[in-house]
Image: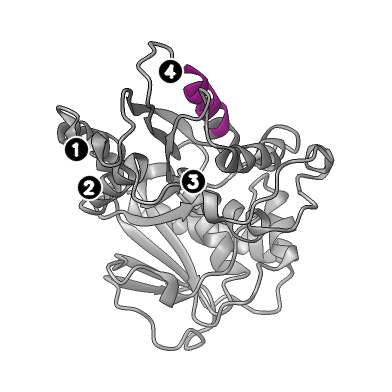
Amino acid sequence: MEILGLQASPRRGGNSEYLLKAFMERARSYGARTTVLEVSRAKIKPCIELTVCEKKGTCPLRDEMADHVYGRLRRAEIVVVASPVFFYNFPAQLKALIDRSQVLWSRKYRLKLKDPKSGRRKGFLLAVGATSGARLFEGMELTARYFFDAIDAAYAGSLTYNGIEGKGQVRQVPGLEDDLNRAAADLCGPFGNRPKVLCLGKKNSGASRMAAAFMQVKAGDRLDVVSAGTSPAADIRPETVAAMAGEKIDLAFQRPRSLADLSPDFRPDYLVATTAAGETGDDPAAGRKIEWNLASNLSAEKLREEVKTRVDQFLSNLFK
């Protein structure tokens, strides 16, 4: 399971940062692979409503959002937002990220494309505010719900604490540790003991990507599926993205991934090698290796159909 934390506070070492770090520590005890993005230090331009996303499902603004953030959102199974309250909502830097997620909303609702992790991604909110108003978090929670829907994540709840302003003050909240333990168990527990599958190719831009996507769609939350390459390309082949879009499966914004990028603790139960025998070199240790030896001269559409058949066979044998 992969968790992305969005740390929204511009203040280093603040209360929301503590909440996120504490939550991630607990998540790792369930085997989670965690990444944190410090949003206030990312180079993300605000939305200027060019409406290209509504028509094409892309954003012409070039920045860290396009280069990294969309892909990280797609990779995660759990997205955790940690933030202080700024005028009853999120800080401007995070709000820019949320507004730019209209691209993902458009791909989902306008283009009718399905993220491979749709239906199981979760979103969770951690927030602190200085005042004690009864409605302090309402605006933030409503925004979070719509953001999570746009990125295809079900809203899984929140931990919010008011009357918190001094640095480190949140640590004094009665029952905080129990709250964090319970939240981590509820979110991460169901993802914890699934079989792990590594779909391994050479470039990670064709068959291995297709295989992982089909497994994620067809197996749902029964598998922890990761895709990587021994010599990854810079981008997924456009033909791969187009062929999978023909199945209404969206691979946009995903990037080829190297084995070195995987957590050293990731030990797959199954390694599915999609390329010809020997092409992936020294494979990581796995419980069982399955070689598909797919031909390299197939069109993207024929490769997609072959991969889909192999995935159906693999899942049928795994879950029989």
* Disc 2 crowd, CA 10 A, few/some/many (<14, 14-19, 20+): some
Question: Disc 3 residue type?
Answer: Lys
Image coords of residue 237 (percent x, y): 70, 68
Report the mark closest to the observer, 2 or 3: 2
- Whether residue 248 sits left or right of residue 263 in the image: it is right
* Disc 1 crowd, CA 10 A, few/some/many (<14, 14-19, 20+): some
Residue at (30, 73) in percent of width and height: 286
Asked whether residue 139 is drawn in magenta, I would say: yes
Question: Disc 2 residue type?
Answer: Arg
In this rendering, the answer to whether 139 lies above or below 156 is above
Task: Give whichever of discs 4 and 2 has the lower sequence position.
Answer: 2
Q: Which residue is under mark 1?
A: 181
Q: CA distance from mark 3 to mark 1?
A: 31 Å
In this rendering, the answer to whether 257 lies above or below 117 is below
Report the mark closest to the observer, 3 or 4: 4
Task: Give whichever of discs 1 and 4 has the lower sequence position.
Answer: 4
- Which mark is on residue 26? 2
- Magenta part of the chain: 136-147
Task: Give whichever of discs 2 and 3 has the lower sequence position.
Answer: 2
Q: Which residue is under mark 3?
A: 218
